[in-house]
C-alpha cells in the first residue's frame, strides 16, 4: 500500500488531496515535527535527505517534493488529469509550477511571520511585501479563468488541484477572494469535489 509521510496540514496536504482524487488506499505517517523533530531523524533522512515532508513510499520506490508526488500519482492512477495532449500537459505543468513557485511563497511568508516568528521578532516589511504581491498574483489567476470552467481544459486537471491547494491558504492568511469573481467561482467548483472536501476535513 502507498504510504505518505507528513500531516495534511503541511505541504503534504496537496498529496492527500491527490490521493483522495485518484481514490487509492494509503497509509499515513504523521511525524512529530515540533518536539521530537522526527523529520530530522536518521531514519527519515534516509528517505528524504532534505528532512522535509511530504515523502511518498510506493513499495521500494521513494519520492519527495509534493509536486513530483502529485505528478506520479496522476501518471500512475489517473493520467487524464495530466491533460489530453502536449500543449495541455505543458499548461498543466505551467500552472502547477506557478502555484508553488510564485503564489505559495508570499503566502508562506505571512504564515511564518504571523504564526511561527515570535511577535517581537516579526519583520513587518516581509508581511507588507507579501500582502502587496498576493493580490497581483490572484488577479493573474482570476483573469486567466475568465470565461473558463477550469484552468487548462474543459474538465479538471492536476493544474486545478495543485493551484487550489495553494489558493486554499488564502483563507489562513486572511486574503479575501471576493474581488476575484472568476477565481472565486472556480475555487468553489474545486471545493465541491469529494476529494477537496476530504482534504479540508483532514486538515481540521
Ligand atoms: N518544496 C517542498 C517543500 C516541503 C516543505 O517545506 N515541507 C515543510 C512542511 S510544510 C517541512 O517539512 N519543513 C521542515 C523543515 O524545513 O525543516 C514540497 O513541496 O514538497
Image: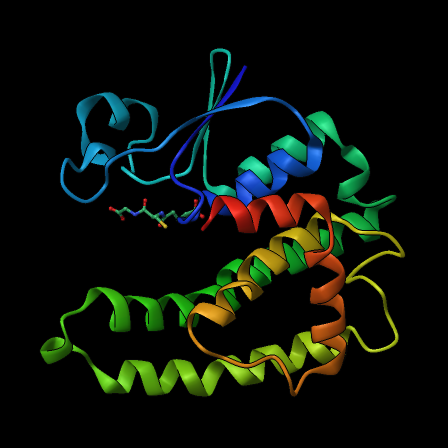
Left-right relation of 33 to 174? left
Residue at the (33%, 30%) spot, across then down? 48
Q: Is residue 105 positioned above or below 154 on the image?
A: below
Camera-side residue of 97 and 41: 41
Examine the image and state in which quarter residue 187 appears. bottom right
Does the image show residue 65?
A: yes
- Residue at point 46%, 49% (across, down): 203
**Residue 140 sits above or below residue 92 on the image:** below
Q: Where is residue 61 in the image (x, y as percent from the top left)?
A: 49, 17
Where is residue 186, by image quadrant?
Answer: bottom right
From this view, report whether residue 25 is shown above or below residue 148. Answer: above
Compared across the picture, whether 191 is left or right of 182 comes to: left
Residue for point 54% across, 61% down: 166
On-image quarter of the N terminus = top right
- Total tally of numbered discs in the picture: 0
Q: Does the image show residue 71?
A: no
Which residue, as the protein is rendered here, is positioned at the far left?
Answer: 120
Q: Where is residue 135 in the image (x, y as percent from the top left)?
A: 54, 84
Q: In this view, does 64 lie to the left or right of 156?
A: left
Q: Residue at x 88, y 75 (%)?
A: 147
Residue lying farthest top?
A: 60
Q: Position of residue 157 (x, y in %)?
A: 76, 49
Given residues 163 and 189, the one toward you in this image is 189
Coloring applied to the structure: rainbow
Amino acid at each position: 500500500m502507498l504510504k505518505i509521510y507528513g500531516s495534511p496540514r503541511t505541504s503534504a496536504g496537496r498529496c492527500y488531496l491527490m490521493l483522495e482524487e485518484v481514490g487509492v488506499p494509503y497509509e499515513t505517517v504523521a511525524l512529530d515535527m515540533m518536539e521530537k523533530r522526527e523529520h530530522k531523524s536518521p531514519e527519515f533522512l534516509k528517505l528524504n535527505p532534505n528532512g522535509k515532508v511530504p515523502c511518498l513510499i510506493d513499495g521500494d520506490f521513494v519520492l519527495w517534493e509534493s509536486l513530483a508526488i502529485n505528478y506520479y500519482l496522476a501518471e500512475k492512477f489517473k493520467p487524464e488529469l495530466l491533460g489530453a495532449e502536449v500543449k495541455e500537459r505543458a499548461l498543466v505543468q505551467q500552472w502547477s509550477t506557478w502555484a508553488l513557485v510564485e503564489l505559495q511563497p508570499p503566502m508562506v511568508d505571512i504564515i511564518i511571520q504571523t504564526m511561527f516568528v515570535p511577535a517581537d521578532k516579526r519583520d513587518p516589511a516581509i508581511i507588507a511585501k507579501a500582502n502587496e504581491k498576493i493580490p497581483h498574483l490572484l488577479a493573474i489567476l482570476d483573469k486567466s479563468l475568465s470565461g473558463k470552467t477550469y484552468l487548462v481544459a474543459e474538465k479538471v486537471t492536476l493544474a486545478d488541484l495543485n493551484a487550489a491547494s495553494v489558493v486554499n491558504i488564502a483563507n489562513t492568511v486572511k486574503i479575501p477572494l471576493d474581488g476575484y469573481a472568476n477565481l472565486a467561482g472556480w475555487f468553489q467548483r474545486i471545493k465541491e469535489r469529494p476529494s477537496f472536501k476530504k482534504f479540508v476535513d483532514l486538515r481540521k
